[in-house]
Image: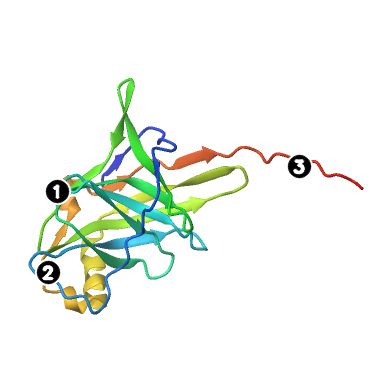
């Protein structure tokens, strides 16, 4: 199975904004119609504990809006409501749960002497459910080095779609489509992100 690899270091902080919210999963009472757009996949967090606010970042080029789909350690197959248009998986995001500030980290690849942004484009069509892959995210913070990113985006369409339909029987009427049909790639393996944190500053202690 071939893989598309990005041979470059990812950017550090791209942009910080406020008032961004994580996209909630679809509820069992949701009723789709001909204009419904659903994005689904396996958004799995590869570690022993959850990292709230660590999300997949999807950008809609037509609406100019982003969606933040959180990685989960438990029950990672789920879906969200989206909007139709030309979309891109642009990387990952860290969202502060209190201030709602967003720290975006885009992926880059090397082309000759230059580094260019690396995105995964796909079309989100009305009246359909879009499979965006089995996305394996990871987040480690050992000491003064924070390392996170997307381990791999795998094409596991048949199995994940079966789980999706089992969990959301009220959405089985929607035709399903895969982004891998559009990208013509098997697996996608981006480079991880590494941020070196500054050492803690010692605080002087006054002895009475």
Q: CA distance from mark 2 to mark 1?
A: 18 Å
Point out which mark residue 136 bears.
none
- How many numbered discs? 3
Q: Gap in Å between the C-alphas at discs 3 and 2?
A: 59 Å
Residue neighbourhood size for the residue with mark 3, other residues' Cα within 10 Å, grouped as few (<14), some (14–19), many (≥20): few
Disc 2: which residue: 174
Of residues 180 and 114, which is closer to you in this image? 114
The mark lying in front, picked from 3 and 2, is 3
- Dot 1, crowdedness within 10 Å: few (<14), some or many (≥20)? few
Mark nearer the N terminus (3 vs 2): 2
Numbered disc 3: secondary structure: loop
Q: Residue at x 19, y 51 (%)?
A: 180
Question: Which marked residue is nearer to the observer: mark 3 or mark 1?
Answer: 3
Position of 192 with respect to 123 (left or right) is: right
| Residue lying at 50% horizontally and 45% vertically, measured from the top left | 147
- 198 vs 118, left or right, is right
Instruction: Please state which of the two labelled residues, at mark 2 or mark 1, is closer to the viewer.
Output: 2
What residue does disc 1 label?
182
**Is residue 142 found left or right of 31 in the rendered image?**
right
Q: CA distance from mark 3 to mark 1?
A: 55 Å
């Amino acid at each position: 199975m071939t893989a598309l690899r990005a041979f470059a270091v990812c950017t550090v902080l791209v942009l910080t904004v406020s008032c961004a919210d994580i996209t909630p999963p679809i509820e069992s009472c949701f009723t789709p119609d001909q204009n419904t757009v659903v994005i689904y996949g396996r958004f799995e967090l590869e570690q022993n504990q959850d990292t709230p606010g660590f999300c997949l970042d999807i950008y809609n080029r037509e609406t100019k809006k982003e969606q933040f789909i959180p990685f989960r350690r438990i029950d990672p197959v789920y879906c969200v409501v989206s909007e139709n248009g030309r979309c891109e998986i642009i990387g990952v995001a860290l969202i502060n749960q209190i201030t709602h500030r967003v720290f975006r980290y885009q992926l880059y690849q090397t082309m000759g002497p230059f580094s260019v942004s690396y995105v995964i484009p796909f079309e989100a069509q009305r009246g359909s459910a879009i499979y965006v892959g089995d996305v394996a995210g990871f987040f480690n913070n050992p000491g003064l080095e924070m390392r996170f990113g997307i381990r791999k985006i795998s094409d596991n369409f048949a199995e994940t779609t079966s789980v999706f339909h089992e969990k959301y029987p009220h959405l089985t009427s929607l035709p399903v489509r895969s982004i891998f049909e559009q990208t013509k790639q098997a697996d996608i393996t981006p480079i991880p992100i590494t941020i070196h944190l500054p050492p803690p500053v010692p605080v002087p202690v006054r002895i009475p």
